[in-house]
Image (cartoon, helix red, strand yellow):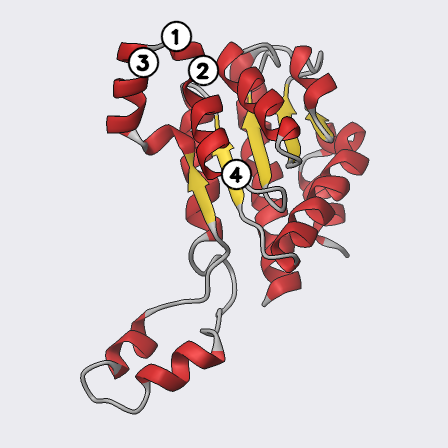
């Protein structure tokens, strides 16, 4: 049974999103293989999910992640630095745009706060990267502007939304529209979706 099969077996409501979830998995793996990274953003519960995604990507999720050989070779020969090899884990580079509190507050104080995620995308993103934008309505202005900026930079955009998909779907390379309309129900199903995506990426890359 594949990761996506298992996901849908546990959460049958996600059957309608099967193809989009599979597409998101491939987009992220391709980005990492090409030297890219993942950026995440959202509001409220979706902001918490943005942080959660980064936590699963930046450290071991379900399997042991070896360090890059060139790094391990440098630190293994010295008693002082050997602890680095013993305690660090392989990583999949990811940045949560919701956690940059000083930058967010400075930008919001000076400019229109609806563009705070777009500003960070403009500063951080390369054309090899992926933006994961979480918005249950699909219409949150700050995530929408982040998606527009990412696409203008040549990045791939994965949006996770409720049933309607909202405005962000036309600025997404992949829109996972969960078949629910109430915010908390969308968010309840968002977590297993991104867990499956992170698990897929880890299995493919480690």
Left or right: 32, with 174 as reference point: left
Mark 3–mark 4 Cα distance, whole angstroms, equals 20 Å
Q: Residue furthest left?
A: 80
Instruction: Compute the Cα span from label 1 to label 4.
Output: 20 Å
Residues at badges 1 and 4 in contact (C-beta under 8 Å)?
no
Q: Position of residue 78 (x, y in %)?
A: 24, 89
Name the residue tied to disc 4.
125
The residue indicated by pointer 3 is 108
Identify the residue at image location x=48%, y=28%: 41
Identify the residue under disc 1.
112
Q: Residues within 10 Å of mark 4 (few under 14, many from 20)?
A: many
Q: Are marks 1 and 2 in contact (CB under 8 Å)?
A: yes
Against 161, residue 201 (above or below) is below
Label 2 neighbourhood size at 10 Å, few (<14), some (14-19), many (20+)?
many
Q: CA distance from mark 2 to mark 3?
A: 8 Å
Q: Which residue is mark 2?
A: 115
Q: Classify mark 2: helix, strand or loop.
A: helix
Is 156 displayed left or right of 49 in the figure?
right
């Amino acid at each position: 049974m594949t990761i996506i099969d298992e996901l849908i077996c546990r959460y049958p409501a996600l059957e309608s999103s099967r193809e989009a979830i599979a597409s998101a998995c491939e987009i992220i793996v391709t980005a990492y293989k090409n030297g890219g990274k993942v950026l995440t953003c959202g509001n409220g519960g979706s902001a918490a999910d943005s942080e959660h995604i980064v936590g699963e990507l930046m450290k071991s999720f379900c399997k042991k992640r070896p360090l890059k050989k060139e790094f391990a070779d440098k630190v293994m020969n010295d008693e002082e630095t050997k602890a680095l090899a013993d305690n660090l884990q392989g990583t999949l580079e990811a940045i949560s745009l919701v956690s940059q509190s000083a930058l967010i507050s400075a930008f919001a104080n000076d400019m229109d706060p609806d563009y705070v995620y777009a500003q960070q995308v403009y500063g951080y993103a390369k054309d090899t990267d992926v933006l994961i934008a979480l918005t249950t309505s699909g219409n949150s202005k700050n995530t929408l502007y982040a998606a527009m900026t990412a696409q203008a930079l040549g990045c791939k955009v994965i949006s996770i939304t409720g049933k309607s998909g909202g405005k962000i779907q036309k600025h997404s390379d992949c829109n996972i529209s969960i078949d629910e309309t109430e915010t908390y129900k969308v968010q309840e199903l968002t977590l297993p979706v991104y867990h499956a995506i992170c698990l897929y990426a880890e299995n493919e890359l480690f």
